Amino acid sequence: MNRTILVTGGAGYIGSHTCVALLEAGYSVVVADDLRNSKEESLKRVEKITGKPVPLYPIDVSDEIALDRVFGQHHFDAVIHFAGLKAVGESVAEPLLYYRNNLNATISLLSCMLRHHVNVLVFSSSATVYRDITSPISEEQEKGCTNPYGWTKLMSEQIITDTVKTNPNLSAILLRYFNPIGAHDSGLIGEDPNGIPNNLLPYITKVAGGKLDKVHVFGNDYDTKDGTGVRDYIHVVDLANGHLAALDYAFSHTGTEAFNLGTGNGYSVLEVIDAYRKASGAEVPYVIDPRRPGDVAQNFANPKRAHDLLHWEAKRDIMNMCATSYHWQQLNPNGYEES
Ligand code: NAD
Ligand code: UFG
């Protein structure tokens, strides 16, 4: 049976990789993305990789009238909801922008789903919803956030959970991602942040590609293996496949379930720099700077629930994450810009 999935935010980093996975698994996709943090070129590349069409509606998902029109033009079997703003620092500076966009998008989407009897939703949440960051982190651990971005994820989870409770035909999966990195093996799609990257891997990638001088390591006095921050980096292609597993599960269940998508392994900043050097053969100079406010020492997943119920696990290692990231950078030194 050919199923059609609405992918909100599908032109973005994780969305574009997930579109590839969906199309390769035999789904049809329709993307709703106003391109505020992405380029249409990413979807052209998805079409190139898969040889399949990716219709794009360049709408604001929180515009319910525009979104409803999209629902009126297709029969969707499920929605994967990536659309949202995601920069932690920006969310602290502009909280209303984040609450307005991320919450309204979720509410508008749920309203359209109910109106059009679309019963399956997979939502992009984040490990940032956990208050108690004692690692490994399991799904039951206490929730609470340190910034507005995180709250929009936790509040969206609550909005979805409450909506599912009163609509027993609905099935929602909340996927709490750890640190997605890497790129598709083709090097045609990857992460293309605007300006100077906030996150470690895009920053290292720009240093390795000669676009930035050196990596600034934020603190080497944490209580970790080498004093630098430890995170659970997960390959974006593994993450994309996690969405396929979540859809399979959602189609055969109702109610709301949350899953961590991580590898269960933690790597320090210095270990990642070292892996990147080895995987790329490039120089990656760095300096030790003070800690970045708000950072925790370590954060990695207990991914057992996803193993047990979704029958999914991350397969790619840190070397592959770094190698594919570098490959993307080499083929696209200016991201999607040049095309
Ligand atoms: P991204 O910015 O590359 O993709 C998000 C996409 O959503 C962009 O293409 C953007 O243009 C679009 N968008 C935003 N608001 C929109 C709106 N109102 N209407 C239509 N389109 C809109 O980000 P990503 O890294 O691919 O992240 C995807 C999702 O996963 C986000 O919800 C993010 O919060 C979540 N997430 C990401 C990470 C990460 O480290 N990348 C970690 C945890 C969770
Ligand atoms: N780091 C550096 N230098 C940099 C950037 C980061 O040393 O230039 C360090 C950080 O201090 C941290 C590690 O690299 O120890 C990873 O930092 P990232 O910014 O790449 O990722 P975070 O773990 O801070 O944040 C990610 C997502 C957020 C999400 C959070 C919690 O980007 O959206 O995980 O799940 F909220």
Image (cartoon, rainbow, N blue to C red):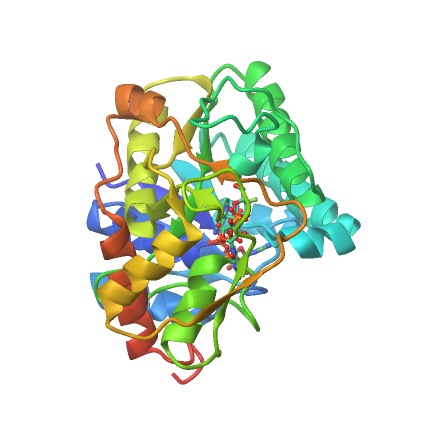
When asked about the image quadrant of residue 162, the answer is top right
Relative placement, left or right, of 293 versus 37 is right
| Front one among 187 and 275 | 275
| Front one among 224 and 333 | 224
Question: Which residue is rendered at x = 43% and y = 35% of the image?
Answer: 300
Question: Which residue is rendered at x = 37% and y = 71% of the image?
Answer: 284
Question: Which residue is rendered at x = 48% and y = 79% of the image?
Answer: 213
| Front one among 193 and 299 | 299
| Front one among 28 and 132 | 132
When asked about the image quadrant of residue 131, the answer is top right
Taking the image as drawn, is residue 15 in sight?
Answer: no
Q: Is residue 21 above or below residue 283?
A: above
Q: Residue furthest bottom?
A: 338
- Residue 245's spot in the image, x, y percent? 29, 33
- Residue 25's spot in the image, x, y percent? 21, 45
- Residue 322's spot in the image, x, y percent? 30, 60
